[in-house]
Image: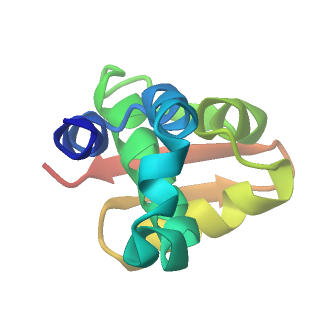
């Protein structure tokens, strides 16, 4: 059912599919108090997974991402991108440097 599909979407880091599933199964999701209470946390987790998937799909020599591109891909507001990147770094998911002057992030390592 929809819950199995939700798990597959998280596994793939597919933020567009997450949004579509949430819209399609809104009533079922709203009938689950724990999902409603933790929806923002789930939203943040899918953004992290999406970021990881984007980085993973790029060749190791091309892991410089524009902050605007990260915002677009993760469906976050631009001012939330730095938080997302710092969260990923603090959790040991990625290593890199955020260059605010040039508006890019250089990813040097991605957790396998």
Q: Residue at x 71, y 31 (%)?
A: 72
Query: Does 50 sit left or right of 101 as displayed?
Result: left
Q: In the displayed structure, would residue 72 be above or below residue 37? A: above
- Locate residue 101 relative to residue 27 in the image: left or right: right
Rendered location of residue 101, percent (x, y):
87, 51
Q: Residue at x 70, y 55 (%)?
A: 81
Residue at x-position 44% and y-position 63%: 31
**Camera-side residue of 33 and 84:** 33
Q: Quadrant of residue 40?
A: bottom right
Task: Determine whether 92 is above or below 99 in the image.
Answer: below
Side (left or right) of 5 relative to 74: left
Nearer to the camera, 30 or 83: 30
Side of 41 relative to 5 (left or right) = right
Residue 83 in the image: x percent, y percent?
Answer: 66, 69
Nearest to the observer: residue 56 or residue 31: 31
The image shows a total of numbered marks equal to: 0
| Residue 42 percent across, percent down from the top left | 45, 63
The colour scheme of the drawn protein is: rainbow
Q: Residue at x 39, y 68 (%)?
A: 32
| Above-or-below relation of 111 to 52 | below
Tell me the quarter of the image containing the N terminus: top left
Q: Name the foreground residue: 63 vs 55.
A: 55
- Residue 20 on image: x %, y %: 52, 27
């Amino acid at each position: 059912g929809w819950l199995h599909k939700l798990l597959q979407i998280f596994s793939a880091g597919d933020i567009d599919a997450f949004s579509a599933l949430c819209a399609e199964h809104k009533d079922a999701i709203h009938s689950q108090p724990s999902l409603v209470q933790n929806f923002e946390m789930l939203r943040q987790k899918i953004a992290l997974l999406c970021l990881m998937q984007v980085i993973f799909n790029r060749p190791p020599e091309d892991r410089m991402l524009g902050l605007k591109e990260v915002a677009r891909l993760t469906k976050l507001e631009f001012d939330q991108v730095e938080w997302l990147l710092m969260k990923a770094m603090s959790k040991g998911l990625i290593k890199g440097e955020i260059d605010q002057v040039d508006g890019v992030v250089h990813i040097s390592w991605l957790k396998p």
